Image (tube, rainbow, N blue to C red):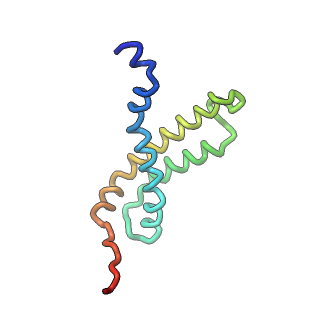
Amino acid sequence: MSLFKRLNPFSRLTARAGALSRIARALKLFAPMCADVIKGRYRPIPWSAFMWMALALVYLISPLDLIPEVFLLIGMVDDVVIVGWLLTKVDKSLDDYRQWKAINIEPPMQNPG
């Protein structure tokens, strides 16, 4: 791989687009999954998804960091990287729910004539 390709920020962003889409998908699916679990429509309960999401939230609100926020940009980057990694784990844990949701899509309500 050429030096230009390794240093090109656009190629690095496109390489990480898959991870960003998994993060967005996890955030989009987590709340509906919680609602389906609470209402008893979806079983088994994906405990790993709850665990990964809880770890992400705890890491965000915790005063402990790998790199403290004293180092402004670098301190915030570690939060983004670690929480992003945890959210990709949430997305992976929601694979079964995603398949169930695709099968159990509610038909749109129709207006009676």
Q: Is residue 59 above or below residue 6?
A: below
Q: Residue furthest bottom?
A: 113
Q: Residue at x 34, y 15 (%)?
A: 1
Question: Quarter of the image holding residue 107?
Answer: bottom left
- The answer to whether 99 appears left or right of 24 in the picture is left
Q: Residue 48, how many percent across, how many down?
A: 44, 50
Q: Residue furthest front?
A: 113
Q: Is residue 14 above or below residue 45?
A: above
- The residue lying toward the viewer, choosing from 58 and 110, is 110
Q: Is residue 98 above or below residue 16?
A: below
Q: Residue at x 64, y 29 (%)?
A: 73
- The residue lying toward the viewer, choosing from 35 and 6, is 6
- The residue lying toward the viewer, choosing from 74 and 13, is 13
Q: Residue at x 36, y 13 (%)?
A: 2
Q: Residue furthest right?
A: 70
Q: Residue at x 41, y 60 (%)?
A: 45
- The residue lying toward the viewer, choosing from 60 and 74, is 74
Q: Residue 94, how many percent across, how many down?
A: 39, 52
Total number of numbered discs in the rendering: 0
Q: Residue 12, how many percent across, how many down?
A: 43, 27
Q: Residue furthest left?
A: 103
Name the quarter where the C terminus is drawn: bottom left
